[in-house]
Image (cartoon, coloured by chain):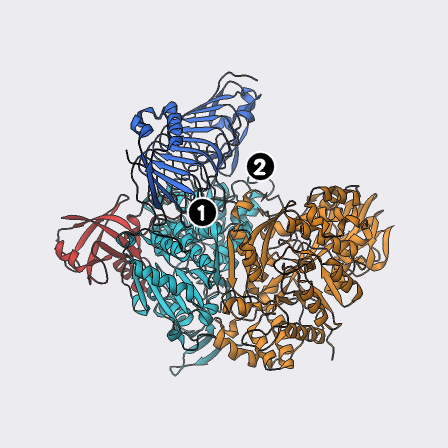
Amino acid sequence: MSSELKIVNGRLYDPANNVDGEVHDLCIKAGKIVGSVSASATRIDAHGMVVMPGAVDIHCHIAGPKVNLARKLLPEDHRLDVHPKTAVTRSGTGGIVPSTFATGYRYATMGYTTAMEAAVPPITARHALEELDDTPVIDKGFYVLLGNNAFLYKLLKEGRKTEFKEAIAWWVNAVHAYTVKLVNTGSDELWKGRKNANITDVNETIDHYDITPNHVIESFVEAAHELGLPHPPHIHCNNLGHSGNVATTLDTMKAAQGRRVHIAHVQFHSFGGQLNENPVSGVREIIDYINAHQNITTDVGQVMFGKATAMTADAPLAWMLRNVRFDKWVNADTECESGCGIIPFSYQQRVYTHTLQWAMGLELFLLSEDPWRVLLSTDHPNGGSFMNYPKLIRLLMDSAYRREALQQVNQKALDKTQLRDLQREYTLNEIAIITRAGPARALGLANKGHLGIGADADITIYTEAEDKEQMFNAPRYVIKDGVMVIEDHEFATDHKGKLLHSKPGYNQDIAAQIEPFFEDYYSVKFNNYAISDDYLHHHEEIPTHPKV
Amino acid sequence: MPAATQTKSQENKNIKIVKDATCTFCGCVCDDMELTVDLDEHRITKAKRACVLGRAWFYEHTLEDRPVVLIDGKPASLEEGIETAAQILVNAKFPITYGLSDSPCEAQRVAVNIMDTVNGNIDTTTSVCHGPSGMAFQGVGESTATLGEIRNRADLVIYWGGNPAESHPRHFTKYAVTPKGMYIPNGKKDRTVVLVDVRKTPSTPVADIFVRIKPGKDFEVLWALRALVKGKRINANIEAETGVSRELLDDLVERMKNAQYGVLFLGMGLTMTRGRHFNSGAIYSLAADLNEYTHFVAKPVRGHGNVTGADNVVSWQTGYPFGVNFNRGFPRFNPGEFTTSDVLARGEADAAMIIASDPAANFSRKAIEHLKKIPVITLDAKETHTTKISKVRFAVATYGINTGGTVYRMDDVPISLRPAFDSPFPSDQEVLEGIRVRVTALLTGHNPRIAA
Amino acid sequence: MTETMLLIPGRSRNQGTSLNEGKLKDEYLRVTSTAELNEKDMQRLQLNDGDKIQLKSDAGRTVVKCKAKKAEDLPSGMIFIPYGPPSSQLMGADTGASGMPMSKHLQVQVTKLKKR
Amino acid sequence: MSVTLLQLHAHTQPEVPLEAEMISPATLAGLSESGIAHLQVLHGNVKAQLGDFFKVTGKGSLDIHLEGNLSNVKMIGAGMNRGRITIDGDVGMHVGIGMSGGEILIKGNASDWVGPEMSGGRITVQGNAGHMVGSAFRGQAVGIQGGEIFIHGNAKNEIGNSMRRGFIAIGGSAGDFAGVNMLAGTLIVIGALGIRAGAGMKRGTIASFEDASLLPSFEYACTYHPLFLRFYLLRLRANGFASKIKDQHLSGKYKRYSGDGIELNRGEMLLFSR
């Protein structure tokens, strides 16, 4: 196949360039979208088909130590969903936590060409990089967990703001991360140091450090702003899953003081009601605030009924779930940096809280006034597998289908939401925004999520169908970097995507200040901690825009 | 950061100093070695901070004068070796690969790829090490931690069925007993150390409390402890049965419940004895139970330098940690069915590729007898009982001494290696990559290996 | 005279160091074919350090040298030997559907062999 | 539907394990003799045909008779939901995997994993069985959910691991961890129980005619005559265990222990005391 492609007669959905379902030809050369190609270019007749940029998952858990622990934990699940090899692709296993190869291929078969792993502790980032290198087809990157970092806390305690910023930049560079991730800020010290306790308020003081989670969050948002990271701090708020956590989530958003911030899987943080009582939907308060504040982006973290796996750096949360559902439970403490909890889970329609969460997610989508900032995710595999995205898209686009679904669920829970009254249907253009253009913009990926000249030639072509689940489940063609990876629904070739990372500038002197802390409190040598460029493999540095 | 500097010694020898090098002899994977390398003699003459095992590892891995490839005992070229190996693997109906725990992850990844390509069976030394702990993990999960966390916080350290003083000499001094930590300012003084074993060993002196139990009664003692932690009654004859008094059990339970941060290290005294995975499972369950009262973790003390990496690589590529079969064109897992000791002892495998391990010395007689009947390919830095019986034998460079790559410490922390001096022998990754390319070529087109 | 005892193969420092010299070298073979017995058991069996004994299990048999251990360190009826080819000879093949052969706590018959 | 006998006679020993899950009445129903002989089996990693290893006589039938040494043939009777398979010889792993109905009779010995994921029907082994009879696979929280497994000889470790429903009987002795993590159901071992029987059991019954040393978390409750056990024993008598079940076992008293104390403590261990 020539490196030139021409897609003709397709209906394009390219919101970033205000193209909404118009028929345009699309030219591809050397992995990029170009103005024209030679007559010898391979032609794809997309007549009666929908052409969109490849989709971008802004928040999922697909690679690294906690994901692999969950893989090891679930042989019984892999057994039920094997992923045979083909003449061109590797074998693997699927289920709720697929093997690396199955992950890449399955994202591709849904038209996804980029996915971001949302939580990796720096000391085990090498592991994440190795797995991402074994995750085919898609481009990928990861967010590094710094929100419970002992050394950074020490700097904040001592009020050393400048060094704090330099150290963050050092860490992002040292592990080749994309941006910083904060999870249940301040909780690690209580979990590990105070017999499994947890932070309950963003204004309470963190043991040993005389600082509050609120102060930590503020400081990260400010530092990331000054460093000009392509994507702002990606925040998993405190009190996830606790009734009444709306207040905590609002406090967290306010802590950003108008600066860019991404609130992860916000559905899990939109609970009304009183602590230790049954939750009710608090979506209205949350979505009103988000609608009114341009600085905030969020992904919904939709819950889908069926299998899930709680897999999080929020160890106290997994412990809470373990006491709801006595199943095999994993806890993994990472020195000076993070905690981790894993527990297999399943969301059931008859269960009050499960239905409530499902409905809250849909409320968030349907009450959102800006699809560019309220983005699609299931927090895979926490709310359900990424393989549910097509079904979720149908729930958003097809109100009749949604009404049927409402009949199947716990009605008492529905009573605590507005979902029955919401008739909105997403358009294909809006779907293109929440799955492509929006995540790409929120991530600062200028070459993704659109089909303009110079964009990466990551393209999905669907045969238009009434049943949107069926349509989004099986693209006819998937093109990655200008290569036709899926042709007529079958893999035509294997393909290796890029690692996406950022390299914020910083003053090298900071290393000399971090090193002594390592000698005292880390079990690896400082000199062996930073990850060499050999682990980048095929990669792309996404530029930062420092404010100075 | 420059970790290596080259100088001249008094005797005018070319000397290289490698700082922060990593020892891959055992699962401690200590990364604070300072190696003095005699570049003229191609040997390491000093290994600062290495333990007695580490020193032996560094000093004894010199460049031996051996042919890179032997086929049926006769020297051959690397290409001939790779071709013969590839032919053996594609012509086998049940080819197996075993070993891998002394190879870097980069090589392990290629090995899994080869077995995926030929629809073979891949297993690592995990299956005869802490494989049972892996099975226990699949049953009940695990509360665990990195070794630095234990160094910083653990005030109660329990070793069960292990003898680290001889198997992992720096486990006490670098990670879990003597070092000072963030919340353990006085090192050992701030920790209580308990050792549980059936006999006194060189590890015993480190213990504040030594619990000697009757051989084969670990599970009963662990079960009694679980019951007592949960406030349940236990049989009065517990001491007669296990050799451990009720008073001692009650004392242990109190100490465990009241610890600030407790850890249970489990050794092969649990996984290799009657009860196997249930013994490990009992430890994991006990640690989980204790989290109702305080913070408690457990951790298997892993043996080989990169056995933990092997678990991780096989898991992320297949979804299962060891004993994986690709006969059907996708991974299947079933310990006892697809684990190497079994497929050999039952006479099922019809070709074997053994990487950096010595089943011909360590397996049961039945398994060894079958291994002698089938074509064997070996990759090893040293002569072993298995290289002696192999049809194709590759002499490879030693990881961590001659070649780089990634290894995982027993607590899943990945570390990059700093080779000390070059070797004329290829790395196992290079040999495996050559074999992968050949088997892929041989199977392309007419592909009988993609099963229904 | 023959007695049934419990064999515990395991790691030892010398086994670990000699392993690095090479598994076909004399030192490794010497280390892995020397079994430790409780001194009182040795007296009863009329054994001295360096005497040869045969160990026999359901799976096989092997001949090793013996070495005395203090009674308080190694309980009576127990034998310790560093892992190696000799201990493997005594190991059964059944893994109990786990992949792990029973490698420790092996029932063995101990028989003193005539010197020559 | 034909009820004439379908005979499969092993004429060639597989060199490596043979996976022949299609040897099951429902799967073969309606197929001709040559159709059956041409069915694909997996010989190690190579596709082969059933006819390469078996002489096929007759067409698809609810009554299948196998002869010869099948100890290296896996998954016979997979997913079987009706009909009858008679195996005149030894059989390999996973016989009757996922079986929901019908009957499998093995006149020789069975290997490991007899009837995993079974939910109905009956498997009878006249000889001995290996490990994991009626057990869960690794990682599974639930083992067999129904059906009957009768082993006339001995069985090895982990009989009925995590079983939730069903009836397993062993005519001889059991290996270690019989009924481990049992959720419910009945396990009768006429011979000796191995060590650590019932470890982690939540509910269900484990009975033996011989005394056993139990885990410290099992507690003696009483000695009584468990009426319901009589019905299970009569059922076994009617199914080839007559010589092993004496009247005293039907009418006698049993020591009842409750356990596992670490779990719900709602399981029971019944040891014959006469």
Mark number, residue B452: 2
Q: Where in the figure is residue A392, as x and y percent of width and height?
A: 72, 48
* Quadrant position of residue D132: top left
Amino acid bearing label 2? Ala
Density class for disc 1 (Cα within 10 Å; few <14, some 14-19, many ≥20) is some
Judging by colour alone, the chain drawn in cyan in this rendered image is B
Can residue A384 be spotted in the picture?
no
Q: CA distance from mark 2 to mark 1?
A: 44 Å
Residue at disc 1, secondary structure: loop
Q: Where in the figure is residue A47, as x and y percent of width and height?
A: 83, 43
Chain D shade: blue
* Residues indicated by labels 2 and 1 sit on the same polypeptide chain: no
Residue at 58% x, 57% y: name it.
Answer: A311
Mark number, residue A491: none
Residue at disc 2, secondary structure: loop
Judging by colour alone, the chain drawn in orange in this rendered image is A
Mark number, residue D264: 1
Q: Where in the figure is residue A377, as x and y percent of width and height?
A: 69, 55
| Relative vertical location of residue B323 with respect to residue C13 in this rendering, above or below | above
Pick the residue in front: D68 or B267: B267
Amino acid bearing label 1? Leu
Chain letter of the residue beneath label 1 in the structure image: D
**Quarter of the figure with the C terminus of chain A:** bottom right
Chain C shade: red
